[in-house]
Image: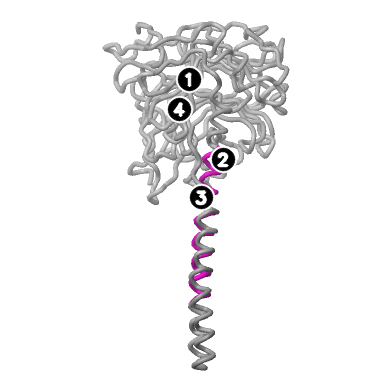
Amino acid sequence: MEIAGPSPIVPFLIVNALALIIFSPMVLANLVFFDIAGSEMEVKLYYCLVVVLYLFTVARFSYASRSHFSGSWKNVEVLKHLNRLNKHAIQTIESPDGDIIDCVQISHQPAFDHPFLKNHTIQMKPSYHPNLINDEKIKVSTMTKTLKDVSSSRQEVISQLWHSNGKCAKGTIPIRRTKKEDILRASSVKRYGKKKSFSSVALPSSIDPDHIDPNGHQHAIAYTKGQFYGAKATMNVWNPNIQQSNEFSLSQIWILGGSFASDLNSIEAGWQVSPDLYGDNNTRLFTYWTSDAYQATGCYNLLCSGFIQINNEIAIGGSISPISQFHGSQYDITILIWKDPGDGNWWMQFGNGKVLGYWPSTLFSNLRESASLIEWGGEVVNTASDGQHTTTQMGSGQFPQEGFSKASYFRNIEIVDDSNNLRDPKDMNTFTEQPNCYDIQTGNNGNWGNHFYYGGPGRNQNCQ
């Protein structure tokens, strides 16, 4: 607990009193001098000097007072926000990557701070799963001599780093503890844990290639339009290089509804590298939601109220391990998001049947019934801080033409239809703002179904 220092108003008042004590006799002495010598000019000059010194002193301490008050107020706000986010832990686990994982009672998680969820009854399992789910394990595909015989690859399970030091008991959920420095990296306490702009969503139909702003968010995605009740895909996991700490690189699924104005609703999940958000360059599992185009509602992971977690094994925001290696083993994760026709909530499953939790339908307007657009793919932030395109990588940092074990991929891409069936999307299109920086290439075969390779290095001889 930090102890506040003395109020800056105290030295301010002391200085003013001293100024009066020191200057008053001088003024009186000069009045006498004026009476004796009659030197009116000297007295006027002296008065001016006294006034200037006095005003300078007042201005200096007034500025110092405001700065002190501003800093103290921000510190109080940060501590209050930490108290809101970091709930009482039944157990604490220190992760090898420096994270602290708090095992919090499921009924005490941040979700229930939301005014819509004060009297919410936790759903411990979905009423229905989508039909024809292929509950495959999270896999690692090991290179063979031919580089093409993926079917003969061995399979292993991806875990999170904190698992090596413990696990959370049933009835609790693992939450990555937020630290003071995490919040201080944000532009404000209010914006901590929130995406910074509406351009986080690619809008393929609204972008004129002749008027693309190369700065900001850039994408390489596949998408489909219609009426949907969920989506699924398996994506391999990488650790892309990030040029600037205020840039990020991610790969995810977007579930979208609305007019892409202030009423955009979005549910998102995947993996990301974001130094600004986490304070490191680890590859992490993440979720996101918004019901007003990233303005005031929603956040990453459990950094605000909304998403209700029921799983005691997976920490949303936790580091993923191991990750794919260039020309080596490929590790991938499977994510399924669907709208339960029974309870109406949007559920998320990670890997082999691990249902993480759900977004209550009451959080949304345009996603309350269904989604109108699904997107799969990568996104980076390009700040162009040195006047050139960023070197922040998307995916593996390789172009899609490099293929398996070198480029990033999404495979077995499916949507959930109005009969709660998983099926291939009928019309899947692609979009990227600058294919010379980040690109995408689709395919279809028996093992991988609808799939694509995507990504790129950012700045190169053809991308400046």
Label annotation for residue 68? 3
**Residue at the spot 36% in from the left edge and 42% down from the top edge:** 459
Label annotation for residue 272? 4
Residue named by callout 1: 451
First of labels 2, 4 by sequence position: 2
Tell me the SS state at disc 2.
loop
Q: What residue type is disc 2 on?
A: Ser
**Residue at the spot 34% in from the left edge and 24% down from the top edge:** 406
Tell me the SS state at disc 3.
helix
- Whether label 3 touches label 4, CB < 8 Å: no
Q: Is residue 257 above or below residue 463?
A: above
Residue 15, percent from left and from top? 50, 62
First of labels 3, 4 by sequence position: 3
Residue 206 located left or right of residue 244: right
- Whether label 2 touches label 1, CB < 8 Å: no
The CA distance from mark 2 to mark 3 is 31 Å
The CA distance from mark 2 to mark 4 is 17 Å
Q: Is residue 68 magenta?
A: yes
First of labels 2, 3 by sequence position: 3
Tell me the SS state at disc 1.
strand
Work out whether residue 204 or residue 243 is closer to the camera in this orientation and state it: 243
Report the label total. Answer: 4
**Residue at the spot 72% in from the left edge and 24% down from the top edge:** 116
Viewer-side label of 2, 1: 2
The CA distance from mark 3 to mark 4 is 37 Å
Q: Residues within 10 Å of mark 3 (few under 14, many from 20)?
A: some
Tell me the SS state at disc 4.
strand
Residue named by callout 2: 197
- Whether label 1 touches label 3, CB < 8 Å: no
The CA distance from mark 1 to mark 3 is 56 Å
Viewer-side label of 1, 4: 4
